[in-house]
Amino acid sequence: MKQVIKGNHAVSHGVRLSRVQVVSAYPITPQTSVVEELSEMCAKRDLDASFIKVESEHSAMAALLGASTTGVRTFTATSGNGLLYMHEVLHWVAGARLPIVMANVNRAVGGVWNIWADQSDSLAQDSTGWIQIYCESNQEVLDSIIMAFKLAEKILLPVMITYDAFFLSHTSEIVDVPDISTVDDFLPPYRPIVEPNFEQPKMFGGFFAIDYFYEQRYNMHQAAKEALGSYQSICREFQDAFGRKYDILEGYRTEDADTIVVTAGTITSVARLTVDKLRKQGEKIGLMKIRMFRPQPTMMWQQVLGTAQKVIVIDRNLSPGSGGAFANEIQAALYPLSKRPIVFSIIAGLGGRDVTPQDIEGIVQHTRGHKNCPEGPLFWGLKQ
Amino acid sequence: MKKRSENAKIFDYNTFRDLTPLNCSVGDMLHNKTGSWRFIKPVFEDKIPACQHACPAGSDIEAWIKLMLRGNFEAAYWHLKREQPFPAVLGRTCYKFCQKSCNHNTLYDSSIQINELEKFLGDQVSPVQSHPLLPAYNGKTLAIIGSGPAGMSNAYFARLLGYQVTIFERLPKPGGILRVGIPEYRLEKNILDREFEGLAQMGISIHCNQCIGRDLSLEEISRQYDNVFLATGVHKSLKLELEGEKDSQHISSGLEFLKNLSLGATPDIGKSVIVVGGGNTAIDAARSALRLGAQVTVVYRRTQDQMPAHEHEVQEAIQEGVDFRFLASPEKIRMDPNGRIREIIFGEMELGPEDESGRRRPVKKPGGSFSMPADTLISAIGEMPDFDYLQGIDSACARQILSIAADGQARMASLPCAVFAGGDIVDIPHTVIHAVSAGKRAAIGMDCVNKQLDFETVQRSISIGRGNALSFSKYMGWPCLNPVPQNIHAVAGAEHIVMDYFKNTSASKIEITTGEKRKQDFGPYRQTLSKEMALKEAGRCMHCGRCMECNNCLIFCPDSSVLPRENGQFGYDIDYDYCKGCGICSVECPRGSIVMLDEEASLASQEA
């Protein structure tokens, strides 16, 4: 049924439709209404889940660590500093190979206080072993939550669905909320490969000394790599069931493009409009939207971007002294190609600053004059 | 406890492929007996809840509430009757020591209304049916002098011990103070009659109109019976000793007035009545006089907060319209030649230095006096036991007999059988529940004498908590309701309650007829709980110190060492092979029924 709902609400519906059994979360702006909605769903038994109240994000994730170990489907949501507070346990649950799903509203990280859109929070978790999916619309948020459980439970790694603060979390859009029976067919109940059993007690998350920690990490890496193939087949299954098409990334008018803009999150919609406009003017321009960031889809990036002459990566995040996370990774991914495009790294929209169609057009125009990679990222729209 | 299988294996990990995807051990970890790390061990130990500890009779309140909640009122009733003989009577007359100590009261300021639940159960089940725990006679006989609460209690418990019991009562009807002291509006007499029918059903015989010292002598009785229990109460009123006081039908003692009323007389008390005194008898007399249509003033020589009468009785008297005059004491009665009172002269008092009771002694205020007219003067300034029946025994010896006998110790002295005493004649608070407790203590005491057991030793093993109440169940070896070890000496106070697991619930509201209405007649005015209300009220109980199988210990145990029992058996087993003694189960037990014991000390005690 189509409904006009906010991104946060879309998350809650995704969780409800996935029949999550344990929710534990701590409120933080702009995630709060996700959790409020979920607690109401639990109270009304629209969602038959235990809602564990905790005093911090660290405890929220720790509670899910325990819950997930017992073999139930678990969920939490957070944002910005809350995600950073979870950091230690993020590593833990990934290492314990627990299929936990989390929604993270991308929010700037304090200090200097800011609650608006910025992807530095989730990108700072790139080494935790979590799969990351970036979303562009409320519909995509809802659908991604449902697919995330299927992926996590298949590869036994946790999955994080991220979406921009306020641009999605607090903006209402038309969302097709699927029927729960359709979701049931797509997403069967979670069956853990090992269920805790009093008769045959086992140790979970035990000690891996020097002799096998290394192999354990190798296995995690393999599982993360496996996510690429698994996610593609899950996306196909999803399309058959719900009619909406997703993939690891989305290439838009890239086939013959000599210039490709790369975005993640809500800037994508703005960039798509600009690409259409410039195409009408005869420019061979395309767009690549990053959806899955961990694992790194190196081959797919090479395929989509490898034939272009210029790649413009717009990062709504910053690693001070280095640059944008997406640009850095894409440059690294393209390096093995014998003929590689020039990569422009653009930092834009930090802390929720609007990135308009005019900005995108300006950025594209700016790159025209350059034949070589400029040194370091370009801060677009800096007040000088 | 079922032992967990030991199939420890050493797994050879050769490649990364040997690791399981979910990072858990491949085999079990049973070879690693982590129990060896422990230096303190958790042990399930049910305790005595604060309410039971406070009850002079040691009523196993938590257990009968639990049975109520299981919907088995019959079982709850009989469990309640393990420690006290008449729930319907105590449900109406008890001063609720349990509720003052109730942990819900300590923590949330509103106790579980245990007394209302007791009344509800007492009214649900008839005492006139065969007692499920009634034994055959043991060949020993017991004579009880006095059929008040102490006598009834002693008869009941002695019968449960197998004694053949005969009660002798001076008045035409049995019940003692319950019959002639407590007015109908506090205890309906048909309730009392039913309890006596219940005692008769148990094979206890009662002979009324038998006054010891007049109709038969104590010596005679002591020759005919193996044991004697003296429970003659306090029925001799102290006199005002006033100037001008004469024998007159318009001057009466509170007890005499209440007794006549209870036995069917309707005394002519006129329009205005003055009651002198500040105890429960004074309040009962005042409220009864009010119900006969008189204007009543209670005059007390001390202040309101020093009244020995129960606070809520005083409040109810005030609601009904009884007037109070404090710091005044009668000095003189002016009577006319026909024996009618003309006026009573009172001296005004003030509080002087403290007396031996710790209260400031009232002393006469120089020059202050006033007079009040009255048709009837009722004095209720205190009662004392009447020891006339101890003829032939000098009074000092009689006192000694009583003091020793009251302790549950037999006194052979100059009588041929074992003598015990209890109730108001000995030095205990004058309440029904204390009398019940005394009757129980004496029944156990005489059984110890007959079985040649050392009473002191027995008492130590069956005394509840740190108090004086004795557990009849423990003496009889009746199993606790929870089939887990119970430490009868450990009390679960408020400090044992983990408040995170409980909600502050408010007490069910009991409908009480207004003072204006209830003074119209002698009928009861407190609503009895409906079944729904009773279950709701019972549901508020926190079950302090008693395992409720809430599974918290099992859930929180980080070593899976708290195990459910097989075949739905009550409680849990602790697998000490693996329990590390972290104590989380004990800390997370909402009601304090898991203790941590020092490992070496408990080993030593096992070896000893």
Image (cartoon, rainbow, N blue to C red):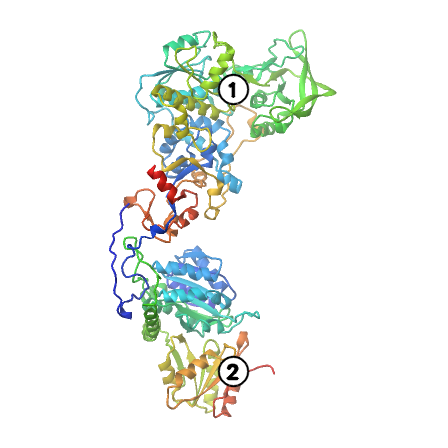
Q: Amino acid at mark 2?
A: Pro
- Dot 1 alpha-carbon crowd within 10 angstroms: few under 14, some 14 to 19, many 20 or more: many
The residue at which mark 2 appears reads as A357
Is residue A93 among the parts visible in the rendering? yes
**In the rendered view, would you say B483 is above or below A247?**
above
Q: Amino acid at mark 1?
A: Gly
Expressed as whole percent of the image width and height from the top left, the position of residue A49 reads 40, 57
The Cα atoms of the two marked residues, 2 and 1, are separated by: 96 Å
| Location of the C terminus of chain B (image quadrant) | top left
Label 2's element? Answer: helix
- Dot 2 alpha-carbon crowd within 10 angstroms: few under 14, some 14 to 19, many 20 or more: some
| Numbered mark located on residue B570 in the image | none
The answer to which quarter of the image holds residue B164 is top left
The answer to which quarter of the image holds residue B1 is top left
**In the rendered view, would you say A295 is above or below A74?**
below
Expressed as whole percent of the image width and height from the top left, the position of residue B444 reads 39, 23
The residue at which mark 1 appears reads as B181
**In the rendered view, would you say B560 is above or below B55?**
below
Of residues B167 and B126, the one nearer the viewer is: B167
Of residues B551 and B329, the one nearer the viewer is: B551
Is residue B193 among the parts visible in the rendering? no
Label 1's element? Answer: loop
- Chain label for disc 2: A
**In the rendered view, would you say A289 is above or below B379?**
below
Expressed as whole percent of the image width and height from the top left, the position of residue A54 reads 47, 57
- Chain label for disc 1: B
Report the mark closest to the observer, 2 or 1.
1
